[in-house]
Image: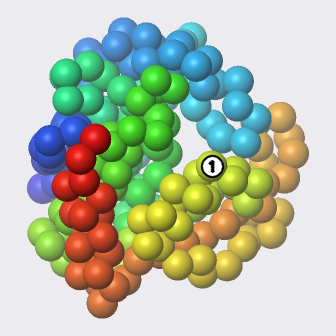
Amino acid sequence: MGWPAPVELRGRDAVLRPLARDHEAALIEATRDGELWRLWYTAVPTPEGMAAEIGRRLALQAAGGMLPFTVFDADDRVAGMTTYMHVDAVHRRLEIGSTWTRASAQRTALNTQCKRLLLGHAFEVLDCIAVEFRTHRLNAQSRRAIERLGAQLDGVLRAHQRAADGSLRDTAVYSITAAEWPAVRAHLDWQLARPR
């Protein structure tokens, strides 16, 4: 098996299962909740493009560059997608990204639980030295969520990528290091234990 190997990650508020082609219909339903593909500052697959996006992610997994997950909520309903990406097995680094969540599940414990599961697995099982997060410099909601995790801003890659509409994206790069993980873990566990 490659690094990282497919795995199911389970918490109270979310379950992450390896992405599979038979998740397509439920993922299409999830992306329609809020018409997320219409957001200009992020790349969420359209309902018509979901099969191609699943195929793209699975191909990257086969090539050793990604481990994609389907996100399920506490009621076992598909809520979105997330991935380990830009996998660097030699240096034990990866990025958590290509994440989207149905609108009705945003600003709930679901995202915190997903990040706790992914970070815990990355640092405690995969022995990562650092985990990155990247987002559009202007995606204030995503940047706030990443900062709430305890990630530190490493910098902004200016004119880093072309968006689907041809515009240039400045990418804000954040990371959490292995040395920072114990404090970040304690904070995430505290957030998840609070009454709701």
Would you say 99 lies left or right of 42 here? left
Residue 81 quadrant: top left
Asked if residue 21 is positioned above or below residue 196 in the image, the reply reads: above
The residue at the point 70 percent across, 24 percent down is 38
Q: Quadrant of the C terminus?
A: top left
Residue 60 placed where, x, y %?
40, 45
Asked if residue 78 is positioned above or below residue 48 in the image, the reply reads: below
Pointer 1 local density, CA inside 10 Å: few below 14, some 14–19, many at least 20? few
Residue 72 quadrant: top left
Q: Label 1, secondary structure: give it.
A: helix
109 and 29: which is toward the camera: 109
Residue 97 placed where, x, y %?
47, 52
- How many numbered marks, from 0 up? 1
Asked if residue 160 is positioned above or below residue 63 in the image, the reply reads: below
Residue 14 placed where, x, y %?
23, 38
The residue at the point 66 percent across, 41 percent down is 42
Would you say 162 lies left or right of 54 here? right
Residue 193 quadrant: bottom left
Q: Is residue 43 visible?
A: yes
The residue at the point 30 percent across, 70 percent down is 187
Residue positioned most to the right: 167
Residue 19 placed where, x, y %?
28, 33
Residue with the mark numbered 1 = 141
Q: Is residue 91 visible?
A: no
61 and 116: which is toward the camera: 116
Hey, what amino acid is under mark 1? Gln
The residue at the point 30 percent across, 33 percent down is 70
